[in-house]
Amino acid sequence: MRGPRTMAPDLFEWVGLRAHGRGFEMVVWALVLLVGLALMWRERVAGRGLRDGVFGWLTGGGLVVFGVWRWFGAAVLGDLFFGPRGLVLPTYGVLMGVAFLVGTSLAFREAERTPGPPGGFGVIDLAFWLLISSLLGARLLFMVTRVDHYVALCTGEAGDCLAFLRIWEGGLVFYGGVLGAFAGGALWCRRRGVSFLRGADLFAPALAIGHAIGRLGCYAASCCYGARTHAAHGVHFPAWSSPFNNHLAAAQGEEREWLLEHMHSHAVIPVQLWEALGELAIFFVLILLVQPRKRYHGQVILTWAGLYAMLRFALEMVRDDAIRGFLVDIRLPWLSGLLGFEPDRVLMLTTSQAIGIVMAVGALLLHLTLRRRAERGVREALEGWRDLETEPGEGGEGAGDPGTG
């Protein structure tokens, strides 16, 4: 038995906008073309050639080429990229946009409050490239976990080789987004002559609060859901959501009849909400405890990395979405018993847990290195001040006094 997957209301449905058809796609691709031209024009006005403004020139050129290609396909060939249903913008996407705006505004405010580059407007420019690189990284890591799926789509009868571009249909991995943002941010900072660690510190609280908002979107989209539970805090997802579909596929006999009768999933742990609360707690730790006492560039982002890695490692044990892949099957019956699971349940090691271990260890080592370097710099500065105070003479008090001798 099959049916449409229930998602949170689409934004276009809320406002009554026609988001499908040839005319709509022609407008969309024309806007993409204009954005590409604007990026290239900005680099030209700033006097940056291809070497200095590679982000702007290549991204702008890519958008121009893609926009022209898709506009021609929609206008002349009737080839609709979004399909007959049109562009869907579910609550997940809306909340991701809100998260980006909230995070950027926080980073802008902190940049304006503290001295040094990047300033507020530099943060806005950096945020744009972080958005692009994070989406690219999140999508690439998702595709790595599902290579066979996309190869089958491209080589199958439908020949859908552009499926990997439809990020609005879901399929983003948070850790991939973080890695992509770090790579894009590092390249931007290097080309602008800006301290990468300072830039990362500016965006660390934004990353925490933005991710908390984004996890609410995951809850609305029924992705990244938790394991089945009989506890009172369990939640049910509606028919044809991801949990319902997976529970139905694994069910037989009376259990299957129960699911079809009630038309909702079994109760599952609301791990999305738990992660949102965890990230919110990390956000307050960063802005109330770490930022005011910051002793070196990189301290804020490293604190976030260590805390989030521990949070994510723990939450992965109670997640149950089918997309997760295990690198190694590790069972801990005693821990499964404490969590209320079957003794033979696999608790680790997922891809995200492995990345979390590397992230936590790396954050600790970098913290020790940078803190030691900062302390050494303070000592050298103090010694320099002492040297300046004793420069008039080398013989202690009275040395070099013209009235002695």
Image (cartoon, rainbow, N blue to C red):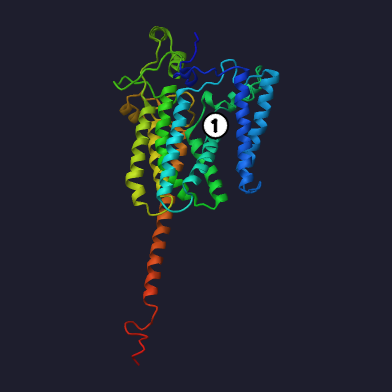
Question: Which quadrant of the view contains residue 207?
Answer: top left
Would you say 61 lies left or right of 6 here? right
Q: Is residue 182 visible?
A: no
Query: Mark 1 is on which residue type?
Result: Arg
Farthest bottom residue in view: 405
Give percent across and percent down for residue 263: 40, 10
Pointer 1 local density, CA inside 10 Å: few below 14, some 14–19, many at least 20: many
Give percent across and percent down for residue 76: 70, 20
Residue sitting at x 43%, y 43%: 107
Give percent across and percent down for residue 314: 37, 34
Disc 1 is placed on an element classified as helix
Question: Which quadrant of the view contains residue 261?
Answer: top left
Residue sitting at x 61%, y 39%: 39
Find disc 1 in the rendering and name its residue: 139
Would you say 403 lies left or right of 144 here? left
Give percent across and percent down for residue 332: 37, 31
